[in-house]
Structures are given as structure tokens and as C-alpha cells.
Amino acid sequence: MLAQNMSNAIKDTRYLALGDSIPFGYDPTVPVNLNNYHGYPEFVSAAIHWKVANASCFGETSGSFLSATASDFGCREWKQAGNPLFVPYSGTQMDYAVNYLTNNPKPEFVTVNIGGNDLAVLQVTCNFDLSCELLGLPTVLATYGQNMLTIFTNLRVQAKYQGPIVLLTYYAFNYADPVQVGAFTELNGIASGIATSFGAKIADGFTAFLVAATPFGGDSCKAGLLVKLPDGTCDTHPSQAGQQLLAATVEAAAGDTH
């Protein structure tokens, strides 16, 4: 794998991966160690033959991506606990991205996957009460849209990066759950609309998982796309099969960009 290690110089990479625990490759069933995490950027990196600077962080939200004081779902605690990141940086992920794109001799490719944890924070804030979640969803989505607009503006305008960007949309854990599907559909629609307006391409992770899960009643767990837990249920993070499917979706969206 052409993974970005702490010792790799930024100038040796051409691909910047941004996002949360999905591109980070987080797996709760293995010890905390970067060698145990294999997210879709690693597979994409190997396929396009560009080393990746993976700046993603476990638990990042669209808010904490931009601000060190915004609500997140574990990124801040992850860093404070001394847990590793694939690339070292002390500020926000946005700060790192702008610095990378400004100072890298030749950045060629960027992937973005952020926002799923915005919904997770809402769930926890509401103590998983559905009526509370539905009431709070419009505000969360509005804030998400503002954050995504800022993120893409910073990538294109502040960092002056005009190369290929691929936005990966979120999959559902259970496509038979209309509430979950509805929330992810709205989130993905907001992100896709903004990303497209900045010339980014869309990797439809939502549909990729849907197609694979359909023979299993829409259950991403039964389809083998999510990390299997010891009790037979699944975590929300992609299994290696799920990560490889997301990577293939990103590569297909990237098309002739490499």
C-alpha cells in the first residue's frame, strides 16, 4: 500500500484524503494502531499510483473540520489521548488541507468524506429520541450546508487548488430503515450540490452500498460491508470489503483525472 506514514515528506505525496473515521479506516475490533486501519484512500492510492496524505480524523464533524471548538464525535478526544493520525498536524483539518495544497509542489487529487458524524452528534444530543432528532435535523442540515460551502470555498479559493476533487457520499447501514435513508439522502444531497458547484465529482457511496445490500434485504451488515462485531452484529464502519467498494466508487468517479 502507498500509505502516508508519519515520516513521509509532504512533497512525496500527490493525493490528499480528507474526512472522518471512514477514510481513516477505523475498526473498533482491532487495537489502536495505524497499521490496523485500512481506509478507502489506501486502496485508491494503490490504484492511481499516487502516495496519499491522509488527514482524516476519527470522529470529525463538518464543524470540527473548520473549528477547534465546534462539536465533534471524538476527534478532539482522539488527539488529546495521544492516539495517532496518519499525518501530523496541530490545527484543524481545514488548516492542514489549505497548507498542504498551498505548499505541496504538485497536488493532483483530493477526496472529501465528511458529515456523517454531524448526524451522530444530533442522535447523542437527543439521547436517540426520534422526535427530537427529526425536530433538530433541519438545523443540523442547514449548518452542514454552510460548513460544506466554507470547506469547498477554502479548497478552491483560499488554497487556489483547481485540480480534481471527489466527494464520497455516505452509505446507509440499513436501507430498509426509511428514517435513516431519508437523513443520509438529505445529507448527501446537500454535500453533492455544493461539491458539484465547485467542479467536484461525486462518488456515490450510498448507491454502491445499496446495490450490494439489496440481495440482503438492504442490510449492509448482512452484505458483509460493515465491520462484524463479536456478538454477530455490525459496527457502522466499513469492513475491508466495504472499504474496497468505496475505493472502487471513488476511482470510477475520478475517471480520467489520473
Image (cartoon, rainbow, N blue to C red):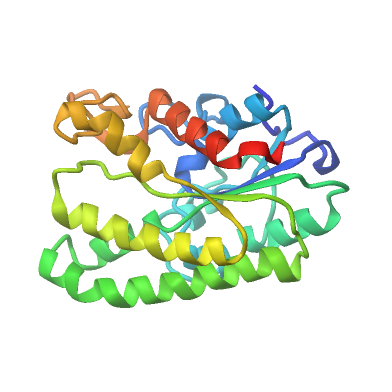
Q: Is residue 92 visible?
A: no
Q: Is residue 195 left or right of residue 133?
A: right
- The count of marks equals 0
Decide which of 52, 72 is in the foreground and name it: 52
Q: Residue furthest front?
A: 256
Residue 219 in the image: x percent, y percent?
19, 34
Q: Residue at x 38, y 57 (%)?
A: 188
Q: Is residue 175 left or right of residue 248?
A: left
Decide which of 43, 198 is in the foreground and name it: 198
Q: Residue at x 21, y 32 (%)?
A: 214
Q: Is residue 186 left or right of residue 248?
A: left
Q: Residue at x 38, y 76 (%)?
A: 142
Which quadrant of the rendered structure holds the N terminus? top right
Which quadrant of the rendered structure holds the C terminus? top right
Q: Is residue 214 above or below residue 152?
A: above
Residue 182 in the image: x percent, y percent?
22, 58
Q: Is residue 241 above or below residue 124?
A: above
Q: Residue at x 26, y 27 (%)?
A: 229
Residue 244 in the image: x percent, y percent?
47, 27
Decide which of 54, 190 is in the foreground and name it: 190
* Quadrant of the image occupied by residue 172: top left
Decide which of 81, 32 is in the foreground and name it: 32
Q: Is residue 201 visible?
A: yes
Residue 168 in the image: x percent, y percent?
48, 47
